[in-house]
Image: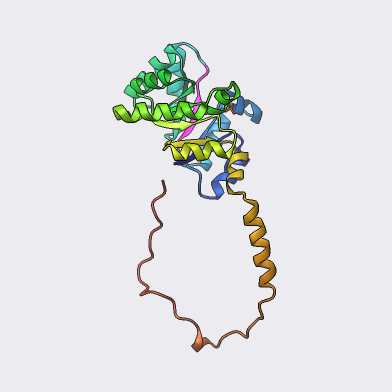
Amino acid sequence: MKFFIDTADINEIRDAASYGLLDGVTTNPTLVARTGKPFLQVLREICEVVDGPISAEVTSLDYEGMKREAGELAEIHENIVVKIPLIMEGLKCVRWCYENEIDTNVTLCFSPTQALLAAKAGATYISPFVGRLDDISHDGMDLVAQIIDIYNAYDYETEVLVASVRHPLHVVEAARIGADVCTMPFSVINQLVKHPLTDIGLQKFLEDWKKVPSIPAPAASASIAPAGKGGAKKSPPKRK
Ligand code: E4P
C-alpha cells in the first residue's frame, strides 16, 4: 500500500520524506490556506521535495473553468495530479483529463455509485473520505470495501486512495482490504510506529547493555571475516 501525506505544510512533508517511506502528497484548499502561502509557491516547494504523485485541487465548479485549471496545474510539474470534486461537471473534466493524459484524483467521494462514475470517467485515483463518513455514523471503511469489490469486478484501473484518515486503525483496515493508497496527516504517520512495549523493551535492553563487560579491542589478524562470498551488493526488496 502506498503512503501519501495529507498536508500542504512543507516542513511536515520534508520530515515525512526523510524516512524514505513517502510515496506522494495530497493537498486540498483548506490545507493550502493553512500555510498562508500562495498556491503555486506551495506546489513548487512540494514538487522539489517529493518525487511522486502530488494532488492539487481545482476550485472552479464549471467544466470550462476546471479544464483551464487542470491544464495549468498539469503544466507545473509532471508529478501533479489534478484533484477534481465528484460532481457532474467534475466527471466531464476527468474524462477530458483522461483523453489528454492528465492524471486525476476524484475527491469528496461518499458513495459507491460516485466511485463507479469516477472509474468510468477514467480517474487515476478515487478518494473515499472515511473519517467524514464515520463522523456522521456511517462506516467509512465499508465504503472503501465496496469500491474495491466493484473495481475488482470490472478490472477498473482507478486506484483506491483512502482519504480523511483520522487514526491508525483506518490505516490497518485500508491495508487489510487491499486499498492502493492511504493518505494520512503527519500526526497519523507518526502514530503508526508507536507501541509502549517497544519503548519499555528498548529501555530494558539499554539498561542491560550497561551490565555487559567491555573487552579489549581484537588484534587486526583476529578480526571477524565478513559472511558470504562478497561480490555484487544485493538490491533492496521492491517496495509496495
Ligand atoms: C484528501 O485528499 C483530503 O485532503 C483529506 O483527506 C480530507 O481529510 P479531512 O476530512 O480530515 O479534512
Q: Residue furthest left?
A: 154
Looking at the image, is 20 positioned above or below residue 234?
above
| Point 40% across, 27% down: residue | 147
Residue 5 in sight from this viewpoint? no
**In which quadrant of the rendered view does residue 160 lie?**
top left
Q: Residue 115: give x, y in percent of width and height.
A: 41, 22
Is residue 55 found inside the magenta-colored segment of the image? yes
In the displayed structure image, the side of residue 8 where residue 108 appears, left or right:
left
For residue 26, say whether it is visible. Answer: yes
Q: Quadrant of ligand 1?
A: top right
Q: Between 201 and 71, which is closer to the camera in this rendering?
A: 201
- Quadrant of the drawing holding the N terminus: top left
Report the span colored magenta.
53-59
Q: Is residue 93 left or right of residue 216?
A: left
**Residue placed most toward the observer, 235 or 79:** 235
The one nearer the camera, 176 or 7, is: 176
Q: Answer above or below: position of 212 versus 74.
A: below
Q: How many numbered marks does the figure carry?
A: 0
The answer to whether residue 92 is magenta is no
Residue 213: quadrant of the picture: bottom right
For image coordinates 65% across by 52% down, the residue present is 196
Q: Is residue 187 above or below residue 91?
A: below
Residue 111 pos. (x, y %) = 46, 20
The quadrant in which residue 225 appears is bottom left
Q: Looking at the image, which is closer to me, 202 or 160?
A: 202
Instruction: Residue 153: give x, y in percent of width and height.
Output: 31, 28
Residue at (57% x, 31% y) in the render: 41
Residue 212 percent across, percent down from the top left: 66, 77
